[in-house]
């Protein structure tokens, strides 16, 4: 299976965090690699700038979820789901993408988007 885009990682990452009180990056990265059935080669693939591709995509997914307020970083290595993130998982959302994330004020601020009347501050 090809390495998923960071957008495809968002929802599985949030769902996995919902199963644990808090997680370390390495733990969650390994859980996601198992879910996506990545081979050893795919898990260790490097980009042209010598960064691990899968690590980088999981990191970006984590960043976007943090910026939306769905998870929080509790120390340099650990993070956990927020009440807002739990609500998103419980809503049985089928996909987390850019449009979904834009509904959260913190994410709009992060992306420097203008507030729009049809966007909400809470999920």
Image (spheres, rainbow, N blue to C red):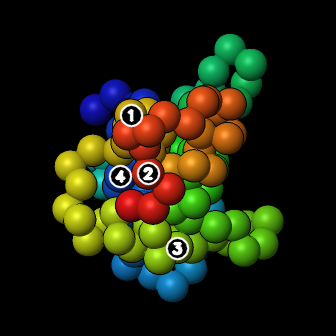
Which of pointers 4 and 2 indicates the residue nearer the eye? 2
Dot 3 or dot 4: first in sequence order is: 4
Mark 4–mark 2 distance (CA, rounded to whole Å):
20 Å
The secondary element bearing badge 4 is classed as: helix
Q: Which residue is mark 4?
A: 11
The residue closer to the viewer here, 116 or 82, is 116
Residue pictured at 35% horizontal, 52% vertical: 11
- Determine the residue located farthest toward the bottom in the rendered image: 21
Query: Picture coordinates of residue 111 (x, y %)?
Result: 64, 32
Quarter in which the N terminus is drawn = top left
Tell which tag, 4 or 1, sits nearer the viewer: 1
Q: Do residues under tags 1 and 3 come within 8 Å of each other at their CB atoms?
A: no
Q: Position of residue 13 (x, y in %)?
A: 43, 57
How many numbered markers are drawn? 4
Q: Which residue is mark 1?
A: 99
Q: Residues within 10 Å of mark 4 (few under 14, many from 20)?
A: many
Residue at numbered disc 2: 120
- Identify which residue is drawn at 61% across, 56% down: 66
Q: Quadrant of residue 103?
A: top left
């Amino acid at each position: 299976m090809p390495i998923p885009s960071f957008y495809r990682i968002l929802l599985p990452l949030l769902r996995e965090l919902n199963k644990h009180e808090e997680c370390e990056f390495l733990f969650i990265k390994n859980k996601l690699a198992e879910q996506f059935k990545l081979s050893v080669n795919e898990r260790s693939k490097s980009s042209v700038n010598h960064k691990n591709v899968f690590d980088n995509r999981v990191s970006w997914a984590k960043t976007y979820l943090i910026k939306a307020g769905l998870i929080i970083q509790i120390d340099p290595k650990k993070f956990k789901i927020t009440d807002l993130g739990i609500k998103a998982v419980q809503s049985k959302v089928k996909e987390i993408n850019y449009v979904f994330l834009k509904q959260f004020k913190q994410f709009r601020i992060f992306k420097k988007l203008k507030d729009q009347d049809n966007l909400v501050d809470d999920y």
